[in-house]
Image: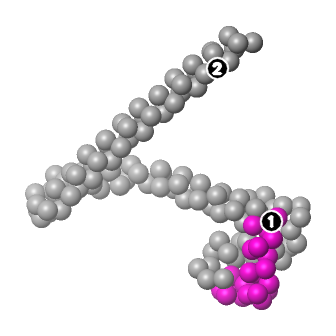
Amino acid sequence: MAAPSENLTRKQEDAIVALLSNPRIEDAARAAGVGARTLMRWLKEPAFEKAYMKARRTAFRHSLARLQQMSGAAVSTLGKIMVDQNSPASTRVRAAECIINQGAKAIEMEDIEARVSELERAAEITKSSRN
């Protein structure tokens, strides 16, 4: 979880952890040892909401890192399926299509990143020349 806020009680911190690991408010409240109404009220408080959103973003970043770690194995799996003559043709085509589509998206993202970087450099040069 993200670093707890100094404004939250221990119960509220526990509730945030419970919210991240339970699909329903009622389940999270039970896991945190508070009532569902209390948890719903806390979710409306700015400090609690801010800490909860920060924890959610942190948890999501960890999930994305895990996805990136597994991407090599995923590509290998797609490649094996694509060239496996024992796989149905439709499955091989779908694997090939997925590889091509994801490769194209990666190139588009690299292009966008390069263009944004160039725009940022140009803006910085313009800003520096004005001063």
Residue span colored magenta? 26-49
Q: Secondary structure at mark 2?
A: helix
* Mark count: 2
Quarter the N terminus occupies? bottom right
Q: Secondary structure at mark 1?
A: helix
Picture quadrant where residue 91 is located: bottom left
Q: Residue at x 25, y 46 (%)?
A: 100
Picture quadrant where residue 109 is located: top left
Mark 1: few, some, or many residues within 10 Å (few <14, many ≥20)?
few
Q: Earlier in the sequence, mark 1 or mark 2?
A: 1
Does 25 appear above or below 92? below
Q: Nearer the viewer, residue 79 or 104?
A: 104
Q: Which residue is mark 1?
A: 46
Tell me which amino acid carries mark 2. Glu
Residue 46 in sight here:
yes
Q: Which residue is mark 2?
A: 124
